Amino acid sequence: MLTKTKAIVLRNIKLGEQKMVVDLLTETDGRVSVVTVIPKTQRGKLKKQYFQPMSILEVEMDFRQRADLQRLRDARIAYPYSSIPFDPYKLSITLFLAEFVYYSTRGEQQNVPLFAYVERSMQWLDSCVQSFANFHLVFMMRLSRFIGFYPNTEDYQPGDYFDMRAATFSPEMPMHTDFLHPEDAARIGTLMRMNYESMHLFRMSHADRNRIVDVLIDYYRLHVPNFPELKSLQVMKELWG
């Protein structure tokens, strides 16, 4: 069936001389892997640069429900980034989040709110002029809402522990080891009060930011099967250092 949809590129892998496998988060079908041929000449409609991580595309593909690889027929840039490709800090965040979303959403079926969240977030980052150092933290925290394990903060009190298995705060230490002590739990509580517009008001040191991203990855690792070490994380940490 010929399908047209918006899609966000998460990863691309070269396959031989001209073929490429591209992993997409699509608006209509969730996670989809497609194979395409990239012409060697500039005259071809499909260009390699379309498939950079987190590019927002309009794609046309032959979609077959049981196929592992769909065949991409056409693609075009739906939202051309004006700053991300030229800003090393934004680019490092983008490459990290592409890898993060790739592993966080494996097996995800159609989830229009999730797609809209990722799309709007990347457009916000592209248009932001300054004060975006906490962007990836807010993005990671809020993404958990769309895949089912956003923490419950209703009963949070200073000094509480955070039970990472149950995604709840508690005055008592949990009976297992997957929890955060009050200092780290408070960081999660603070992060949950932040959004893209207000995050610049929350001052964080480089060490605080790195600690939070490590805690969030541990949190995702508990809830997402086979969540690996992220290769792009160290690059981002070093650049922001």
Image (cartoon, rainbow, N blue to C red):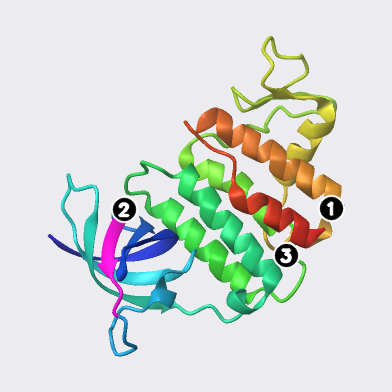
Q: What's the distance in space between the residues labelled 2 and 3, CA to CA? A: 30 Å
For residue 48, above or below residue 29: below
Q: Residue at x 31, y 53 (%)?
A: 32
Q: Earlier in the sequence, mark 1 or mark 2?
A: 2
Query: In the structure shown, which secondary structural element does the residue marked by tag 3 occupy?
Result: loop
Which quadrant holds residue 156? top right
Residue 110 percent location from the top left of the image = 32, 49
SS majority, magenta = strand
- Quadrant in the picture for the C terminus: bottom right
Q: Residue at x 31, y 54 (%)?
A: 33
Q: What's the distance in space between the residues labelled 3 and 1, CA to CA? A: 13 Å
Query: In the structure shown, which secondary structural element does the residue marked by tag 2 occupy?
Result: strand
Q: Residues within 10 Å of mark 3 (few under 14, many from 20)?
A: some
- Inspect this view and state whether residue 138 appears: no
- Quadrant in the picture for the N terminus: bottom left
Q: Residue at the front extreme?
A: 17
The reply to whether dot 1 and dot 2 touch (C-beta < 8 Å) is no
* Circle number at residue 132: 3
Q: Residue at x 60, y 73 (%)?
A: 126
Q: Earlier in the sequence, mark 3 or mark 1?
A: 3
Which quadrant holds residue 13? bottom left
Residue 229 percent location from the top left of the image = 59, 40
Q: Earlier in the sequence, mark 2 or mark 3?
A: 2
Amino acid carrying label 2: it is Val
